[in-house]
Amino acid sequence: MTSLWKATAVARKELRQIWRDRRTLLILLFVPAFFLLVYGYALNFDIRHVRLAVQDNDRSTASRELISTFLNSGYFDLAGEVGTPEAIDRVIDRDEARAVLIIPAAFGVDVASGHPTSVQVIVNGDNANTATTVVGYAVGIAGEASARYELLAHLGSPTGPVLRVEPRVWYNPELRSTLFLIPGLIAYIAMLTAVVSTALSIVREKEAGTMEQVRMAPIGPLPYVLGKSAPYFVVSFVSAMSIVVASILLFDMPMRGSWAVLAGVVSLFLVGALAFGLLISSLADSQQVAFQLALLTSFLPTLMLSGFIFPISSMPGFLQAVTYIVPARYFLVALRGVVLKGVGPAVFWQDLAALGVFAVVTLGLASVRMHRQWALGR
């Protein structure tokens, strides 16, 4: 009984301590519920709301019905109409459409008479998993439409389906998952390395007690921050570019774009990541807290909410809105554009602008925090 009473007393004391430590209580209660809510919706392998562009060369009732069949399936959303091969290149390169349905001329006449015909579906293959699923959707929808055409044409035992799909996968015709995963790994490793390294570097000075000596030295906050960040920028940049080179040599990843453009894209992304690490270091008082904040705000969003693994279009609307503040979302578009598609900044300039805004905002917030702490002697 004595041991039980002592254990009960310790438990009551610990409960009071947890109640007083609101930060720990918040982590224990709020964070698991938050993860369940956010990633329960994000972890979705269903591919829906695929942006579909259409080139209707027949413009008949049958062609319009086929387009409606695709759109009413629940898998595709109309991204617009295209009329030329150049327009198809543009919508695929700019990621305005994930697939293009091309309906040939005389399509209506052929299906009405039961004459075998085919439609072409061009799919963006930079995401191998999504491309495979989209091709499967198109084949399944065409099969249902073909059965309906055969019934209307009163074909008792046709030698083959009236309607076939001819899929063409661009940028990754073999649908190798490596070409999809490697750009995501580059973003993941670069973000984690840059954020964690800078987040810990300045906090380490606080814990060691050397921050006071730095403040007494003839150096201002900005030169100090730039000097602390520069080595980590070099390390992170070399790491990211080394992954690209190793992927080309070991996994036959193509490099269809410009190395200079790739270096610029990686550098812009790293500047934002380093600035974010500095912001974390200005908020944290210990390396443990800084490391936890870095993992929570860079590791999980980059992995789950950037489109690296789970398609953003399949997420709920509120979660899609959250992805707009995840810099890896824009970095992946630009990176795959350079490496797999061979396009230039004119195609993904909006993503570069978003990365620039993120870098400026986070660097500004970090500078304000550092100046304030410098002035207060903290």
Image (spheres, rainbow, N blue to C red):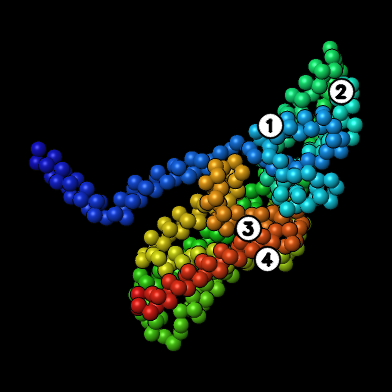
Indicate the secondary structure of the residue bearing disc 3: helix
Of residues 107 and 159, the one nearer the viewer is: 107
CB atoms of marks 4 and 2 within 8 Å: no
Of residues 203 and 324, the one nearer the viewer is: 324
Q: Can residue 242 be seen in this view?
A: no
Q: What residue type is labelled 4?
A: Ala
User: What separation in Å lies between label 3 and label 4 (alpha carbons)?
Assistant: 12 Å
Task: Please state the total of marks drawn on the protein image.
Answer: 4
Indicate the secondary structure of the residue bearing disc 2: helix
The answer to whether residue 219 is above or below residue 256 is below
Judging by the rendered image, the residue that carries numbered circle 3 is 331
User: What separation in Å lies between label 1 and label 3 (alpha carbons)?
Assistant: 33 Å
Indicate the secondary structure of the residue bearing disc 4: helix
Q: Which of marks 4 and 2 is nearer the N terminus?
A: 2
Judging by the rendered image, the residue that carries numbered circle 4 is 263
CB atoms of marks 4 and 1 within 8 Å: no
Judging by the rendered image, the residue that carries numbered circle 2 is 112
Q: What residue is rendered at 34% in x and 46% in y? A: 29
Q: Which x, y percent locates residue 40?
A: 48, 40
The answer to whether residue 215 is above or below residue 290 is below
